[in-house]
Amino acid sequence: MRTAKTFSVLFWVYTQRSDKNNSSNIYARITLNGKKVNLSLNQKVNVDSWDPKRQKLKGNGKTSREVNYYLDEVKAIIVQSYRDLVNESKLVTPQLIKARYLGEDTRNHTLKNIFSYHNDNLGVNLAPKTLCHYKTSQKYLLKFLEAEYRKSDIFLCDLDYSFILGFERFLRSYFFSEMQGNVLNGL
């Protein structure tokens, strides 16, 4: 059975770019349907120790085993990235596989980003007092972040059930000096 897609990962060392210690970076090339993208692995090796046919370091020493194991891991992650993109029914390109490997294909939103997006884009459809309540909730949430996590912002992927319970506990115990009451009844 013939396959319409060709996919490969290979490793090489630029021998022409070796430094005075005769070491050079290892690069990975991702090829999909004849289109290529290169990726530096930021791993320097001695050019004389590199086996271009096997695409690994020669020998069985500790350094060789570690680097070869690292290359096997990199290849496995790149292949898994390719499989994930195919399973997601996306148009797969070598650049997209590289971005998935580097973690650049997903946008990580923060709590402030979501509040800003909501207030800017959806706030025009809200009554002014309702928008004021959203902004008040945002203010208390950011105060909670600063008090409990010592952060000014947090990624949404870091939010969990304990965060929600902590925020509720914060609201139930938060007192204003000017109104001398807890906040939860007013939200």
Image (tube, rainbow, N blue to C red):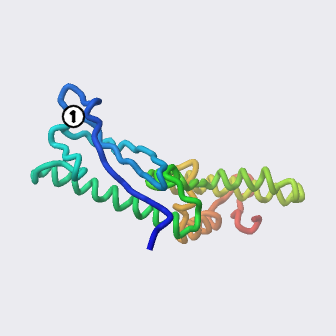
Task: Determine whether, in the image, residue 116 is placed left or right of residue 65.
Answer: right
Which amino acid type is marked by label 1? Ser
Residue appearing at x 23%, y 46% in the figure: 52
Task: Determine whether, in the image, residue 112 is placed left or right of residue 127.
Answer: left
Task: Estimate the x, y position of residue 19 in percent, counting from the top left.
Answer: 24, 28
Closest to the observer, 182 or 155: 155
- Write down the quadrant of residue 170 in the picture: bottom right
Residue appearing at x 19%, y 47% in the figure: 51
Task: Estimate the x, y position of residue 115 in percent, counting from the top left.
Answer: 70, 54
Q: Which residue is mark 1?
A: 23
Residue appearing at x 44%, y 74% in the figure: 1
Task: Estimate the x, y position of residue 53 in percent, counting from the top left.
Answer: 22, 50
Image vertical order of residue 19 relative to residue 166, above or below: above
Q: Secondary structure at mark 1?
A: strand
Residue appearing at x 63%, y 53% in the figure: 142
- Write down the quadrant of residue 71 in the picture: bottom left
